[in-house]
Image (cartoon, rainbow, N blue to C red):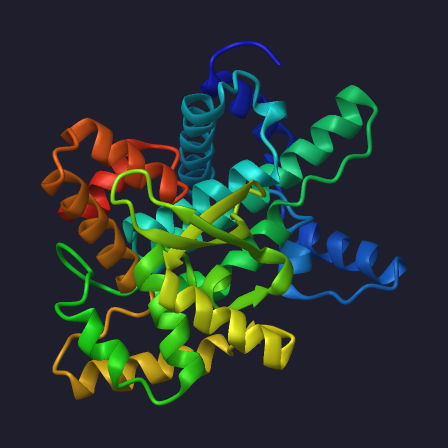
Amino acid sequence: MRGNFKSQVGRLFQEIDGVGCSKWADKQQARAELQSRGESATSSAIGARTSLHSNSTNEKYFDKCVELANWAREVDGIKDVEKINSAHVAEFLAEKIDVGVSLSHWAGYSAAFSKLEQAQQKFALSVRGEDKQFGYRAATAALRPEAHAELQRFQGTRNYQNPTAMISVMQTDAGRLTAAIQHESGLRITAAAKVTAEQLKGLIKDRYTGEMRGQIQYVCKGGALLTATVSHKTYSELQGHILNKGEFKIDHKAYRSELKDAAAKTGQIFNSSHGLRWNYAQERFGDLISRGISYEKALGVVSAEMGHHRISITEHYVFGK
């Protein structure tokens, strides 16, 4: 597809433009279609098949989809909105969690991208003659629990004042180990709370500090295979747990509850598990600067280690701006 992103997204949105048409009739048709296919007529299923009947909603979703396209161009050189895929959507939404947008704002993005998927499917079928699936709704659904747990109202930075003290009073060994992994590597809860033997990649010397650190391979939100590192001590504990249990795993809800109790015990504001990711970014950056690494280089190192595509996101973590 050619043209600027506004014209491209505008063309796609023509496929789902229902302004001036009966919303009720549209829903009835969607219910009938679902019934004929033996599928449940849930609100989300109906919504995935109905057009946009409000100009204001259309404009809001349009702007968010153009923002996604501009982001995809910046991080991946995308110039054609037909080339946007579920990995882009997942990484974009994960980035919004990173910067701490409000939950309602995040939900607005997910709703907009659901309609973008519908528009792309219709366009692919009517114009390209292709029956394509894009997977945006699945990508959003996979991130929704993290968004609901992590996106709290806050100002400035979300780091913990004394993460070491908080981790030391965690109730369970599994909870303490998960928190240590997050604090030492900057991993998200989804990657830190479940680790298998295959993900352990041995020790490596940190090129900036000379410290021996254990490598954990994981798949980031966009599907890329990345490697994080933790202290030798934490890595050994993780190895031992996996050797005894077969894998390392902790329930996300139980872990967050344990983390909340530990924050209260040590007199700290609970910033969910994501706060430890902030601690890692700030501590790693400060350590690199103290060793004579330039500002730009230090930001680049932390950005790469956290799986960020844009330095501005890392700056948000380091400086809370």
Q: Check the image and report above or below for 61 versus 111.
A: above
Q: Is residue 163 left or right of residue 52?
A: left
- Residue 267 drawn above or below residue 282: below
Residue 208 in the figure: left or right of residue 245: left
Quadrant, the N terminus: top right
Image location of residue 42, percent across then percent down: 68, 66
In front of the other: 53 or 110: 110
Q: Is residue 314 left or right of residue 119?
A: left
**Residue in the foreground of this view, choosing between 87 and 109:** 87
Q: Residue at x 69, y 48 (%)?
A: 49
x then y, percent, for residue 253: 45, 79
Residue closest to the eye, 34 or 66? 66
Give the quarter of the image for residue 288.
Answer: top left
Instruction: Determine which quarter of the picture holds residue 308.
Output: top left
Q: Is residue 113 left or right of residue 175?
A: right
Q: Position of residue 314 (x, y in %)?
A: 26, 41
